[in-house]
Image (cartoon, rainbow, N blue to C red):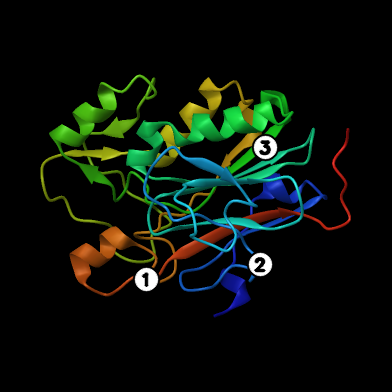
Amino acid sequence: MSDALIRTSALLSSLSWLEHAFLPAGMAPPAESAFGRQRHTASIITAEEAFPPKIREADGVIANGSRPVAVYTADCLPVLIADTRRHQVAAVHAGLQGALAGVLPQAVARLIRGGATPESLYVAIGPAIAPCCYELGDEALNNILTNPLATAPRYFSSQPRNVRAVRPQAQAARRGVWFDLPELGRQMLLDMQIPAAQIEILPVCTYCCAEPRSSYRRNTHTSEGYDLRYAWIRRRNSEVRSP
């Protein structure tokens, strides 16, 4: 697997005290990474509780040491968070179900209890399915519109065209709407008072823009297979948390 397919966030890369990556489909995270057994919940645990990997159910992991924390996705949002005040880091898996369950507010709240402030948090939302390819029916849309955490859901009645697409976009199947999952994540972070300038969305749709085998949904349409995509973040070994 080529390292050229590894993506990073310009926002997080500006923080010299950490390392991070959004890996291509099928590439393993660092061997010492901590991550949970993901179940689309709002459960957040520590790196100590999440190592060895998958010994606990959780959809977010927080570290205040140098162990990498990771999540795995195949269309859902991989969200990496850095706290410039206490040098905590977090990796969060936020699909539609987990986002509506509150996994992002839970992660932010845990970081704040650990000494962060909303103004000290920097967030990157990595490659995920985008509104160009994410069609939802009436029942799913109603679940979003009636959820108090979805204060400003964004969706389109006509399928948006993705000028970055390198393979065909999803075809309409149900006369539904085209939902913006990355924007839902961004809205939830803004509602937690994180400054807009400290939230970055990488503009890569896993269905039509990323490398092959990146999308679970595409596989259900084409049977071409899919592999998990890992995202990870860690504090550099030389860093010591400020008191």
Q: Secondary structure at mark 1?
A: loop
Q: CA distance from mark 3 to mark 2?
A: 24 Å
Picture quarter with the C terminus: top right
Task: Look at mark 1 in the image and give the residue it sits on.
Answer: 213
Residue 122: give its label: 3
Q: What is the three-letter code of the residue carrying label 3?
A: Tyr
Q: Is residue 171 left or right of residue 218?
A: left
Image x and y of residue 17, in percent: 82, 50
Dot 2 or dot 1: first in sequence order is 2
Task: Look at mark 2 in the image and give the residue it sits on.
Answer: 32
- Residues 111 and 118: in front is 111
Q: Badge 2: how crowded within 10 Å, few (<14), some, or many (20+)?
A: few
Q: Quadrant of residue 108?
A: top right
Q: What is the three-letter code of the residue carrying label 1?
A: Arg
Image x and y of residue 7, in percent: 59, 61
Q: CA distance from mark 2 to mark 1?
A: 25 Å
- Residue ID at (51%, 21%): 191
Q: Secondary structure at mark 2?
A: loop
Which mark lies nearer to you, 2 or 1? 2
- Residue ID at (21%, 69%): 222
- Residues 18 and 126: in front is 18
Picture quarter with the N terminus: bottom right
Image x and y of residue 6, in percent: 59, 67
Q: Quadrant of residue 100?
A: top left
Q: Is residue 72 left or right of residue 87?
A: left
Residue 73 in sight in this render: yes
Q: Badge 1: how crowded within 10 Å, few (<14), some, or many (20+)?
A: many
Q: Is residue 176 left or right of residue 77?
A: left
- Residue found at the far bottom of this picture: 1
